[in-house]
Image (cartoon, grey):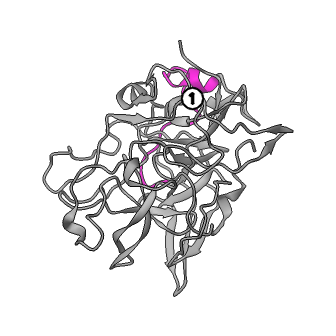
Amino acid sequence: MKSKSFVAAGVVAALAGLVVLPSAGAAGYAGYVPKTLTGPATGTSIASPARNTVYFCPRVIQGITFPTTLTNPTNPWVFGTTVNIADSEDVAVPGSVKMKHVFSIRKTATTRFLKGNGIPNHAMGEFPIPSNSAAYSYYAALPAQGYANAAEIPIKPYDMSLTVPRNPVVQSKPSCILSLAVGIASQTGAAWHAEIAVSADFKAVSPSAALPYDRCWGHPYAEQYHYHGYSWKCFPNQGKKGEPSPLFGYAADGFGVYGPYSEGKPGSAVTGATQKPITNAQLDVCHGHYGWINWDGKLRYMYHYHTNNEYPYMIGCLRGKVGKMSMAMMHLGH
């Protein structure tokens, strides 16, 4: 049976074929195309920093304390803790909608300023979701403030900006995630959201197991388009064969977010990549680590995050000081 009880964060839609990427074996192409995502098991704590989870700031919503553990939802594309990507995309939000895209990055000696309208540079799914689509019933069962149900939520431009240190510093202790927006994909100009949602019966869940997305693994929350899970699917620069994945964007603390293929051993050249996707075991509690990366055109050994196919897929907590973010109003439950 379909599980429809999820009030989630996020669904951006892009059809198969909207953004056509070369096959993994194509010459010069290093993009990682996963077949599955590994999600969190029921009972996974979100109350402290740890691998394979998110560290979500404690909060009270409408007088109810937010749950401190995750519940693994049941859906046709979820098999235990495994999310089958093909099965999820079978019920993806249809459509090929292009909207005006505005995005820029400005640097000073000490800061990096990202600003845009939140609309990506690729086509999205059709929101509101067509009632005759496979995805419609999952969203139509969910309440949505200001709309008849979540399927009726459109995508609209909004004031998206993030000001962060150009050279962020690792703090002594990682910070919990306060806002749903945890970073911006600089390759497309759209936001990443934390991999957490709340169900209608007030359980914390992984949104990638709770709802189907569009073909670029995005959707709107509060009318704002953003990515989850296999978020890099439609990114235009996936990297070169035999080399580490390039910069995909910036986290809310200013550190870079890189793709699934990591750099070589500390001190080695960047071209020492193994072309094996990075695993959570190689990353810290915030889904990052130190390594040699291309940072503002120079090779530097510094902290950074990675995307991969293991929960939380991008950022589990924040290692640096969170910058000034106009998207910070997007707190879960608002």
Work out whether residue 56 or residue 147 is closer to the camera in this orientation and state it.
Answer: 56
Q: Is residue 80 left or right of residue 18?
A: right
- Does residue 269 sit above or below 61 in this rendering? below
Outermost residue toward the top in this view: 1
User: Where does the image place residue 152, in percent across and percent down from the top left?
Assistant: 64, 32
On the image, numbered disc 1 is attached to which residue?
A: 42
Q: Is residue 37 visible in the rendered structure shown here?
A: yes
Q: Is residue 132 magenta?
A: yes
User: Where does the image place residue 209, in percent across and percent down from the top left?
Assistant: 51, 30
User: Where does the image place residue 45, in percent across and percent down from the top left?
Assistant: 61, 39
- Does residue 223 sit above or below 170 in this rendering? above
Which residue shows up at 57% across the image and 55% down it? Answer: 317
Q: Is residue 74 magenta?
A: no
User: Where does the image place residue 29, in percent across and percent down from the top left?
Assistant: 20, 53
Give the residue type at disc 1.
Answer: Thr
Which residue shows up at 50% across the image and 21% down it? Answer: 75
Q: Is residue 278 left or right of residue 115?
A: left
SS label for mark 1 = loop
Number of residues whose C-alpha sits closer than 10 Å to that of mark 1, classed few (under 14), some (14–19) or many (20 or more): some
- Does residue 101 sit above or below 136 in this rendering? below
Which residue shows up at 55% across the image and 36% down it? Answer: 206
- Does residue 78 sit above or below 160 in this rendering? above
- Extent of the magenta region: 120-140
Quarter in which the C terminus is drawn: top right
Task: State whether the magenta stretch is mostly helix, strand or loop.
Answer: loop
Outermost residue toward the right in this view: 63
Q: Quadrant of residue 322?
A: bottom right
Outermost residue toward the left in this view: 27
Q: Is residue 141 left or right of residue 64?
A: left
Work out whether residue 98 or residue 136 is closer to the camera in this orientation and state it.
Answer: 136
